[in-house]
Image (cartoon, grey):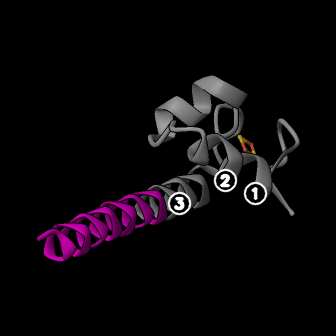
């Protein structure tokens, strides 16, 4: 599904950009030009970037929590 008709940028392209570490709307705009034409997609773009950035942050938090649990488990098995 296209997010930005002016530049032919799809939702999946936006998600990939955010997953690469670009987590701001301005950063995504700089990367692919989405939202810099007529502006009709800008609100939807902002929501998608925010949503994907939050998912990224949650995954990072879960990964860090898992690492803490694994470290804690290892420590408790030490004599
Ligand atoms: S549809 Fe995205 S800038 Fe026009």
The residue at the point 16 percent across, 67 percent down is: 75
Q: Does the magenta stretch include residue 24?
A: no
Q: Residue at x 83, y 35 (%)?
A: 7
Q: Are marks 3 and 2 in contact (CB under 8 Å)?
A: yes
Relative to residue 72, is residue 32 depicted above or below?
above
Residue matched to label 3: 52
What is the magenta segment's predominant secondary structure?
A: helix
Q: What stretch is highlighted in magenta?
A: 55-79
- Sequence order check, earlier mark of 1 and 3: 1
Which circle marks residue 11 in the picture?
Answer: 1
Q: Are marks 2 and 1 in contact (CB under 8 Å)?
A: yes
Residue, far left: 79
Dot 2: element: helix
Quadrant location of the C terminus in the rendered image: bottom left
Which label lies toward us, 1 or 3? 3
Expressed as whole percent of the image width and height from the top left, the position of residue 9 reads: 82, 44
Relative horizontal placement of residue 52, taking residue 71 as reference (left or right) = right
Q: Distance between the residues labelled 1 and 3?
A: 11 Å
**Does 78 sit left or right of 55 as displayed?**
left
Q: Position of residue 22 (x, y in %)?
A: 51, 36
Between marks 3 and 2, how big is the CA–CA gap? Answer: 7 Å
Q: Which of 58 and 41 is in front in this view?
A: 58
Q: Quadrant of the N terminus?
A: bottom right
* Residue 11 image point, x, y percent: 76, 57
Residue 71's place in the image compared with 42, above or below, is below
Q: How crowded is mark 3: few (under 14 residues within 10 Å), some or many (20 or more)?
A: some
Pointer 2: what residue? 15
Residue 50 occupies quadrant: bottom left
């Amino acid at each position: 599904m296209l997010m930005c008709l002016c530049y032919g940028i799809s939702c999946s392209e936006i998600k990939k950009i955010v997953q690469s570490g670009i987590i701001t709307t301005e950063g995504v705009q700089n990367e692919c030009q989405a939202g810099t034409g007529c502006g009709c997609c800008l609100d939807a773009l902002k929501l998608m970037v925010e949503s994907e950035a939050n998912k990224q942050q949650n995954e990072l938090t879960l990964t860090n929590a898992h690492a803490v649990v694994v470290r804690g488990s290892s420590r408790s098995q030490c004599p």
